[in-house]
Image: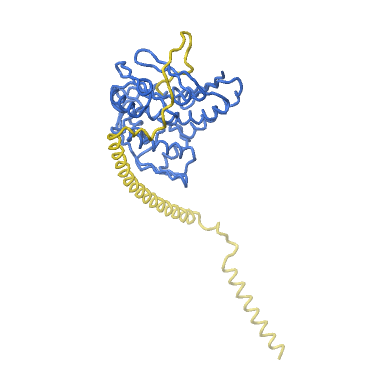
Amino acid sequence: MLRHAFQCMGTEVELVLRADTGAEVLPRAEMEFRRLDALLSRFRSDSELSALNHLGSCRVGPELIEILQAALEARERTGGRFDPTIHDALVGAGYDRTFELVAAGVVAHSPMSASCGGEVFVDDDNSMVEIEPGYRLDLGGIAKGYAADRVLALLAVAGPALVDAGGDIAVTGGPWTIGVETGDGSVVLELDEGSVATSGRDRRRWSAGGEDAHHLIDPTTGRPAEGDLLRVTAVAATGMEAEVLATALFLAGDVDDAAAEADVLGVPAILVAEDGRTVLTGALA
Amino acid sequence: MTNHIARLYAAAGAILALFLAWAGIAAHPWQSDQTTPVATRVDSQTRALAAYEKRLKKDARLVRKVVRRRAAEARAARQAATAAAAAAAAQSATASSSWSPAPSVRVVTLPPAAAPAASTKTS
């Protein structure tokens, strides 16, 4: 078993290869992760995403086109709950720098709402992207899943592999066991292929002007979401889908609504309410 | 006779040469553009830049106007599509068809000393 860990995208990334050979692919996979971070981070002024946010309209590379198309498709599939145009709402909530700096510093003002649901035009043929004036993009809700999918494809050449991007996990060539925290302990999932992602307000949270704030923005209010859910773990075919589904279910409002929706969609999910109540849905029920 | 004509040509040529020399000297060919006053050059460059900036701002205003109009149209179309999708979802559970089929997953119990390969957490 080969393991390789590093810090990237504001979190700890671990790559696991169930093989004795192929160690040379691990540094290459790390480089790919770092390359994608350099393209997609809103916290790096030199990233392609920051350039697009600054200019509002510009020519971009194929990865940004691909992830934007996926994000816009996800917005449509989730009825707008997942939204890549929540950048200003995140900034309004105080998440205007990396989470480490937000957590270490002080946010003096209460969360301020900002308009979400801006239009984004992606011209695939000319590699052009235009954002509706007044909006900016944040890909934090999908970029780690995208990177995990890309890196997993690289590792899969060498053997059964697992990519853990700060809790967003993608696996291939299983069975792989993955621990999931519940309200009163934990369960272990076994997965051959696919991804697991968790969205919640138990970790990336901070105090803003005396109010609790977190990074899961409800696009209908432009503010951190309210409801009785603490955390949602979703299982899906890809890292991107798992991240989007976890966020969309979290924004369903309360644990019962989210569970009903997950069952309708057939999504295996673990929903944990603030009072510790845990509901398993889909194939896990 | 021939000498007379030759003298006339010579006189005409001399006058022409004198005129050309005068015109050449009057044009001050030894003075290059660099002797144009600096203030005059800067003024003309500034004017050109200002005109360029004005043109760019005008173009940017036009682009913003077009993007806003397209955004409004796209938003209306998206809201209509979302409403249609919501209506379809209310009628049937086939709304899940746009997602990839969920992978096979099960809850397992590990032996006491074993740990999972990884653990998910809020990202």
Q: Quadrant of the C terminus of chain A?
A: top left
**In x, y percent, where is residue A205?**
35, 22
Query: From what the image shows, is residue B74 above or below residue A196?
Result: below
> Of A194 and A22, which appears nearest the observer?
A194
> Of B13 and A41, which appears nearest the observer?
A41
* Residue B105: quarter of image: top left
**Numbered-mark total:** 0
At 36% from the left and 21% from the top, the residue drawn is A270
Chain letter, yellow? B
**In x, y percent, where is residue A130?**
40, 44
Q: Quadrant of the N terminus of chain A?
A: top right
**In x, y percent, where is residue A52?**
43, 40
Does residue A240 appear in the picture of this structure? Answer: yes
Q: Is residue B44 left or right of residue B97?
A: right
At 66% from the left and 85% from the top, the residue drawn is B8
**In x, y percent, where is residue A216?**
35, 27
Query: From what the image shows, is residue B122 above or below residue A220?
Result: above
User: According to the rendering, which colour does chain A have?
Assistant: blue
At 29% from the left and 36% from the top, the residue drawn is B86
Q: How is the image coloured?
A: by chain
Query: From what the image shows, is residue B81 above or below residue A256?
Result: below
Query: From what the image shows, is residue A181 above or below residue A61?
Result: above
Does residue A110 appear in the picture of this structure? Answer: no
Name, please, the residue furthest toward the top. B112
> Of B36 and A22, which appears nearest the observer?
A22
* Residue B71: quarter of image: top left
